[in-house]
Structures are given as structure tokens and as C-alpha cells.
Image (spheres, helix red, strand yellow):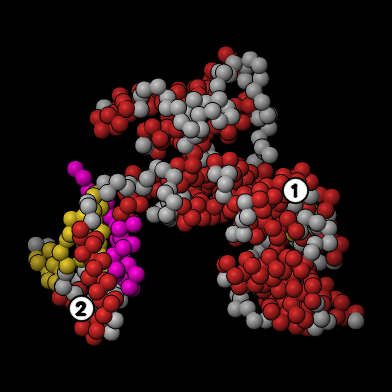
């Protein structure tokens, strides 16, 4: 899935602007990674990559694309970097670069699709960007900048911070990488599990940041980049780079399956509100629809199939990590009439791994489906989640099913007060009004 | 790369607090001494000196040409450093790995890893 128009393939001679955008999306991360590998300098790598893409944008539409776009971009960028260093007379950097000036290194991934003679060093780059010596927010920003090719402005918009703040964050992070000696390499086995988890956490954070926005808003011009698409791109790249890691496939499957419901998760404001006689939507233009109430015909079946195929890789690799289990749960939800007993077991296993009361809350929901609301409520009431909105919404729902309407209304009241303005809060408020109306009539 | 590893004892029991130190099992005390000697013998390590507790510190400032002397460390007592070492290493990961072997890191203190300024 590529959200950019016209990025499917390059034309025979001239290259339309849309295709260039697609090439940029596909190749930016590899070009920057190859340059960091050769130059050992993130800033210089980015500047040189930018120059190379600018030259391509000027030249390719007139002369047609080169035989290997990737090799052309990396070579051009490297030459620009060499020019820059020669001009800046930076001796230390010069010696380092002269060593890299020979013919391109033929690495183990040299024959990767795309026919580039350069080794793919994106994995080294992402481990550098997601190094735990950097603040999490800096890891996220750097990953989106260097691997994803997002601009500082786009990243700032996506995370709702002023552009100068984001620029400063990126500068500091790059400075720390250089000054503190954060390595550009794939971590050794002893560090691998911890560092891979950090990388996956960054990708999942990017996904979730984008996932909270309705799809219309996600793709709207000026609303910032589509972070879900960025997260999927990163997830796919990781699945390609470390095909033997179940958790990598687990994360990708999880994201694909969640995102396959993007068009059913929200309905235009008014529809839902009028239908249920709920309060007007005010500021927003969409309403949230719960999984059980979603119009399944609006799910993206092709993406579900892809997600399930990726999930089968998780199973084949024997993956039972946190992402693999969440993918299993998401996969179970793709079937009509999901197997709640199985889902409850998966949540129990996930709960043992994470010790998270939120997971226990989800397990209680599944148990309620299997054994009835009373069993579910008993589990819910034990959880230390008094400030968590879904805790109260879940209690409200289970109490309503038990006919304890007054208590259910009180629980939804609490959920509403704990939720910021937006579709979610309106959804809780609507449910509360429904219950109150039912109580009056009954 | 050259790093300074600054050792903050925090609430780590040390021989400077004889009661807390005596509360540690003898094997643990020996393990701590052994860990420090192994670290000091690690290639690339230049051992630093240990410091007396932060209560013995004196802080000096000069304001308007006048020397102002105050009792105690510049930072909070619990944040002040108690020792350091210098480590010549390939990269930050190597320095982090060494820092994790310093007993204070697991006994209530923390190690700050800082690259040394190279001119």
C-alpha cells in the first residue's frame, strides 16, 4: 500500500513528478543509510541525499530515469558529499571519506531487488536512530527523518510541536550520536532482544500516533504526514531486513490488521448521533464506531489477507511474543463471530508476558463474552485502573448488560470526564444518554 | 572514543557507612571488591580515584571578586559523584556494557557515561 499517487512504476522515458515522489519514498532510507555507512555523519548524509534527489527531480523528467535509480542516487549523493568535504577542508572527515571513495562495496545484500551494487544499511541506521541513549521522542523523530524521509515540518505537525522545537530535537539527537559515539551497526546477539524491542516500540508508537486520527484527517493536506503509512513502510522494511524475527512480523501483521478497519472505525458525524439521538458532535466531523458495530463490508479485505499472511509467518516462526500475541488477537477478530474463548486465552498469555492491567481488562471483556457479564465484571473490579477511561466504559457496558443501569450510567459519567473532547468522548456520552433514556422509558 | 564513567553511589551500601556495609552478606562484599578490581583491570580502563562522601565536600564560587565558600556538594548530596574511571572504547555500547558491571549500578546508584572532550 503506497498512499502516494502514481508511484507504481517508472515511465519509459521522462519521469512524472508522482513517480519521483514514489522513488523518493522507496529509496530515501537506503540512500541515507548507505551514506551514513560511508561517511559516518548523519547530517552530511542527509544533505547529500537531499541534493541527489533535487538533481534527480531536475534531470530525470528531461532525460529519463537511470537504469538503477538507487545506484544513481547513492553514487550522486556520495559525489556531492565528497565535493562538500573538499570544500570544507575538514581533514578528519576527509581521511575517513577517502577510504570510502573506492568502488562501491559489494555486500551480502548486493543482489537485493532493485539491482543496486550497494549494501542495504537501513538496519544499521534504524538501530542507531532507536538507540536507548537517545530520548524516545528523539528516536521517533530521527527514524521518521532518516528512514522515512519526512521533513522536520511534517514531523512537527504529526506530533503537534512547534517546528523549531522539532528542529532542535533532531539537531541535539544527531549531535549526541556523533559526540557520544552511538554506533552505526546491527547490535551483537547480547544486545539484540533489547535493541530490537526498542526499534519495534518506535515503529508502533508512530503507528499509534497516526491511528488515533480518522482516515479523512490522516490524508488531509496540511494535517501532517500519514503516520500509519510511514509505520507500515517501516514495518515492511524490517520484515524484509530481519525475516527470521517473529516479533517483527507480529508487529507488521498487527498494524496491517488494525489499519484494515480504518474506513469502518469512523462514520461521518450526524449519522451516528442522529441514529442514536445522541448529543451533537460540535467540533468534530466524525464519530467512532466500536469493533462489534462496524460495517464489515468497509473493511479492507486485501489488507486483511496480507495481514493474515504475515501472521502465518509469525506462527511458522513459533512467535509468542507481545506483538505476535496481539496479532493473533487481531487475526481472531477478522472472523465473523470471533472465538472469544480463544481470544481470552491469548489475552491471558499476553497478560503473563506484560503484567499489564490493561491487558487484563481486555481479557475480562473476552471472558464476559464467553461466561457472561457477571464473570467479566468480577475480573474488571479487581483491576487498579481507576483513572483509565476504558476501565469505566467497560464496567458501564457490563453493568448495563446486567441491568444495573444506575451504576452503568455512573460508570459512563466517569469515562466521559476522563476523556478529552473528540469522537471517543462523544461516543461514551451517547451511550450514557441511551442508557438514561432506556431507564426513563422502562 | 574516550569516556568518563562517573559513579554515583546513591543508596548503595559502601564501607563509608559501616552499618549499611555490615548488613551486606560477606559474599556480596567480596563480589563488590572483585567486580571493582576486574573493572580496573579491563583493557582500556584508566582507574580514577574514589572520593570521600559528599558530606565532606566544600563548594567554592567567586562572585564580584569575592570567594564564597559553602559547605556540601554543588549538586544534591544524593546526586553527587563518588568516583570515576576513564574508559577508552570503540563506541557507546562498550561503555554502557562496562558501566553495567559497576556494582553501584545494581545496588541503588547509577553510572553516568560522558564522552571526554577531545581537542
Q: Going by the image, does B54 lie left or right of A351?
A: left
Q: Is disc 1 placed on a helix, strand or loop?
A: helix
Residue A408 seen in this snapshot: no
Query: Which of B52/A277 is in front?
Result: B52
Give the Cα separation between the discs numbered 1 and 2: 62 Å
Query: Which of A296/A367 is in front?
Result: A367
Task: Residue A60: give x, y in percent of width and height.
Answer: 57, 18
Q: Is disc 2 placed on a helix, strand or loop?
A: loop
Residue B51 seen in this snapshot: yes
- At horizontal 66% and vertical 70% (from top left) the residue drawn is A348
Q: Residues within 10 Å of mark 1 (few under 14, many from 20)?
A: many
Task: Residue A85: give x, y in percent of width and height.
Answer: 32, 27
* Residue that carries the numbered disc 2 in the rendered image: B15
- At horizontal 57% and vertical 71% (from top left) the residue drawn is A355
Q: Name the image quarter holding the C terminus of chain B.
A: top left
Residue A354 found in image quarter: bottom right
Query: Is residue B98 located in the magenta-colored stretch of the structure?
Result: yes
- At horizontal 44% and vertical 45% (from top left) the residue drawn is A186
Which region of the structure is painted magenta? B97-119
Amino acid at each position: 500500500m503506497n498512499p502516494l499517487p502514481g508511484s507504481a512504476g517508472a515511465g519509459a522515458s521522462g519521469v512524472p513528478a508522482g513517480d519521483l515522489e514514489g522513488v523518493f519514498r522507496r529509496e530515501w532510507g537506503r540512500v541515507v543509510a548507505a551514506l551514513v555507512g560511508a561517511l559516518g555523519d548523519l547530517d552530511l548524509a542527509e544533505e547529500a541525499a537531499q541534493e541527489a534527489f533535487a538533481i534527480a527531480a531536475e534531470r530525470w523528467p528531461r532525460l529519463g530515469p537511470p537504469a538503477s535509480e538507487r545506484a544513481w542516487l547513492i553514487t550522486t549523493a556520495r559525489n556531492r558529499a565528497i565535493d562538500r568535504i573538499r570544500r570544507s577542508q575538514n581533514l578528519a572527515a576527509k581521511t575517513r571519506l577517502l577510504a570510502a571513495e573506492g568502488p562501491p562495496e559489494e555486500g551480502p545484500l548486493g543482489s537485493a531487488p532493485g539491482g543496486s551494487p550497494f549494501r542495504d544499511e537501513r538496519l544499521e541506521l534504524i538501530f542507531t536512530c532507536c538507540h536507548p541513549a537517545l530520548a524516545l521522542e528523539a528516536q521517533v523523530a530521527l527514524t521518521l527523518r532518516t528512514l522515512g524521509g519526512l521533513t522536520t515540518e511534517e514531523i512537527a505537525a504529526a506530533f503537534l510541536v512547534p517546528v523549531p522545537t522539532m528542529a532542535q530535537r533532531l539537531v541535539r539527537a544527531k549531535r549526541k550520536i556523533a559526540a557520544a559515539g552511538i554506533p552505526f551497526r546491527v547490535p551483537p546477539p547480547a544486545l539484540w532482544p533489547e535493541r530490537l524491542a526498542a526499534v519495534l516500540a518506535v515503529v508502533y508508537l508512530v503507528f499509534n500516533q497516526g491511528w488515533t486520527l480518522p482516515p479523512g484527517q490522516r490524508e488531509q493536506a496540511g494535517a501532517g504526514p500519514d503516520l500509519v503509512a510511514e509505520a507500515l513502510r517501516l514495518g515492511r522494511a524490517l520484515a524484509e531486513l530481519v525475516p527470521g524475527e517473529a516479533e517483527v512480523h507480529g508487529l507488521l501483521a498487527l498494524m496491517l490488521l488494525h489499519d484494515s478497519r480504518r474506513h469502518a472505525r469512523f462514520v461521518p458525524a450526524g449519522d451516528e448521533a442522529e441514529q442514536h439521538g445522541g448529543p451533537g458532535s460540535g467540533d468534530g466531523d466524525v464519530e467512532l464506531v466500536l469493533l462489534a458495530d462496524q460495517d464489515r463490508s468497509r473493511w479492507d479485505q486485501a489488507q486483511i489477507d496480507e495481514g493474515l499472511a504475515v501472521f502465518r509467518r509469525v506462527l511458522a516462526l513459533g512467535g509468542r511474543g507481545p506483538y505476535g500475541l496481539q496479532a493473533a488477537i487481531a487475526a481472531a477478530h477478522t472472523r465473523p463471530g470471533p472465538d472469544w474463548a480463544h481470544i481470552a486465552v491469548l489475552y491471558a498469555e499476553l497478560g503473563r508476558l506484560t503484567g499489564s492491567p490493561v491487558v487484563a481488562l481486555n481479557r475480562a471483556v473476552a471472558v464476559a463474552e464467553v461466561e457472561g457479564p457477571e464473570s467479566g465484571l468480577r475480573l474488571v473490579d479487581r483491576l487498579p485502573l481507576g483513572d483509565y477511561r476504558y476501565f469505566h466504559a467497560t464496567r458501564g457496558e457490563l453493568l448495563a448488560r446486567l441491568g444495573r443501569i444506575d451504576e452503568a450510567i455512573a460508570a459512563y459519567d466517569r469515562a466521559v470526564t476522563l476523556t478529552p473532547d473528540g469522537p471517543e468522548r462523544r461516543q461514551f456520552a451517547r451511550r450514557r444518554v441511551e442508557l438514561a433514556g432506556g431507564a426513563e422509558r422502562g | 572514543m574516550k569516556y568518563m564513567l562517573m559513579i554515583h553511589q546513591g543508596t548503595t551500601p559502601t564501607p563509608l557507612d559501616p552499618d549499611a556495609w555490615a548488613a551486606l552478606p560477606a559474599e556480596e562484599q567480596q563480589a563488590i571488591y572483585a567486580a571493582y578490581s576486574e573493572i580496573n583491570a579491563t583493557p582500556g580502563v584508566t582507574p580514577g580515584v574514589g572520593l570521600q562522601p559528599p558530606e565532606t565536600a566544600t563548594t567554592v564560587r567567586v562572585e564580584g571578586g569575592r570567594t564564597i565558600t559553602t559547605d556540601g556538594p554543588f549538586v544534591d548530596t544524593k546526586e553527587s559523584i563518588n568516583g570515576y574511571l576513564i574508559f577508552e572504547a570503540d563506541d557507546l555500547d562498550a561503555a554502557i556494557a562496562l558501566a553495567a558491571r559497576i556494582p553501584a549500578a545494581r545496588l541503588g546508584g547509577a553510572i553516568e557515561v560522558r564522552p571526554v572532550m577531545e581537542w
